[in-house]
Amino acid sequence: MKFSLAIYAAPYTSQASATALKFAQTLLSDGHEVHRVFFYGDGVHNGSRLISPPQDEINLHQDWQTLADQYSLDLVVCIAAALRRGILDQSEAKRYSKEVDNLGAPFELSGLGQLVDACVNSDRVITFGA
Amino acid sequence: MSSKLATKKILFISRKAPYGCAMAKECLDALLAASAYEQDLGLLFMGDGVFQLKKEQQPEAGRQKNISATLPVLSMYDIKDIYLQASALAERGLTADDLVIPVKALNNNEICELMGQQDQLLSF
């Protein structure tokens, strides 16, 4: 079955983004397809490559990266929600004259249309952190 | 924009009060964005979400945009299927007269039925 995930929760604040990661890992290892992971609201913080948890804790950003590399996942961060919260890629940092950017590849900034596309092109969209 | 997309029935479920967190606003942002893609969209207010419909909101003092100003505009975006959970409204001491727009009140069985008719549910 083809799934998409919508994640609205910041990492570490609630269980939701860790649960979403685990859910995605399980889907993929069970042979399902993940069409897209869409990060919205506070969920955009999962895209920050500056996330630096203690060594003995899960690194959610890194684990999403690893999973995305393994399965060529589409990790989309809502651009409107991200800019408000200070999650910027190189071109947005330049556009807003910021000295630094913090979005880690393969996370990508894009619009809410990607959530609609996920609804249309997936059998199920599962929301985490609503 | 993306007229190549198939049409799906998508119900946006908004369950949070308007200003304590960003969820109510982000639900409406997502809904308005979705309206550009020619989908069959609906909006259901449940639980504290019914507070978004209340007349006489004054969020400006808290430097927030007034959510209730967006609601009357939804019909212009072809979003006409707007529902609320009748029990949530009653539990909060509100009636249809307290609301900025007319909304179809559904009991919980009708909500189950509505959800069953959808291709996707997006909960906020």
Image (spheres, helix red, strand yellow):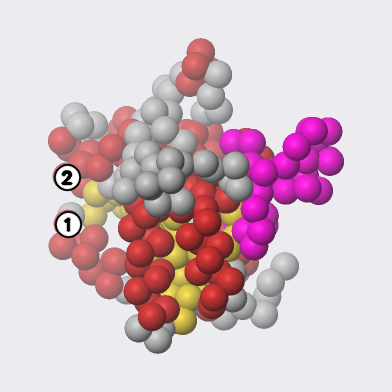
Residue A22 position within the rendered picture, expressed as x and y whole percent measured from the top left: 35, 64
Residue B120 position within the rendered picture, expressed as x and y whole percent measured from the top left: 40, 69
Q: Residue furthest front?
A: A55
Is residue B79 shown in magenta?
no
Examine the rendering and report whether any part of residue A113 can be seen.
no
Q: Chain of mark 1?
A: B
Callout 2 amino acid: Ser
The residue wearing badge 1 is B108
Towards the viewer: B37 or B102: B37
* Contact? badges 2 and 1 (CB < 8 Å): yes
Give me the residue at 46% from left, 51% from top. Answer: A59
Determine which quarter of the picture holds residue A68: bottom right
Q: Residue furthest top?
A: B61
> In the image, B120: left or right of B33?
left
Determine which quarter of the picture holds residue B56: top left
Residue A90 position within the rendered picture, expressed as x and y whole percent measured from the top left: 78, 48
The residue wearing badge 2 is B87
Callout 1 amino acid: Asn
